[in-house]
Image (spheres, grey):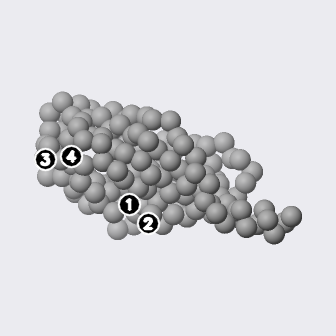
Amino acid sequence: MAFVLSSCGNAPVSVRLDDFSIKVDALANTLGKVVYPKQAATFEKSGLHVKTVTLNGKLTYSADIGSDSLTMAFYARLSDPKDAGCSDAGLAWLCDKANETPISDPQTFQKDTPTPFSLGDKNPTILADGINQGKIWIGVEVTEESAATGVTFDFTDMVANVTLF
């Protein structure tokens, strides 16, 4: 029986996530910095050890005023940015990109167009470590040259692929 459970633990389990939106007043090129929220995303620990996590879904970028496309990459960290020498920008932390862990390649999103994307293909263990410790900071580097205001990111059709061991 232990062999069967062990074998199942290596197969990914897919969990469908609820759709959600993030609203941002303004957005511009982050100039080689990764922007993190002040507070980590927190999770209730399940008691299971998560080995890897990837997230797949669609992201729709919209803005009241702004460019027709937006290029950005996602990053993750396990420790508080304030303890890592990151700059306090009021509502967020700004961390040097060179010291951060990418969880996606840069991708371009067309305005008002649902675009498939994935998080965790790069460094899938950091998302798992965040779930195992009960908190993680997810940040973004924006490489778009123009600014946008009234920005909304709609995350839809999200699926978490989790491997346990």
Q: Which residue is mark 3?
A: 146
Q: Nearer the viewer, mark 4 or mark 3?
A: 4
Mark 2, Cα crowd under 10 Å, few <14 / some 14-19 / many 20+, is: some
Q: Amino acid at mark 1?
A: Ser
Nearest the camera: 119 or 94?
Answer: 119
Residues at marks 4 and 3, CA–CA distance in whole angstroms: 14 Å
Q: Can residue 160 be seen by looking at this rendering? A: yes
Q: Are discs 4 and 3 less than 8 Å apart at CB?
A: no
Which residue position is annotated with label 4? Answer: 110
Q: Looking at the picture, how far across and down is residue 139, in whole percent?
A: 39, 51
Q: Is residue 88 left or right of residue 144?
A: right
SS for callout 2: loop
- In front: mark 3 or mark 2? 2
Label number found at residue 122: 2
User: Which residue is painted at 58% across and 46% down in the image?
Assistant: 15
Label 4: which secondary element: strand
Residue 34 location (% of width, % of height): 34, 55
Say whether residue 128 is left or right of residue 55. right
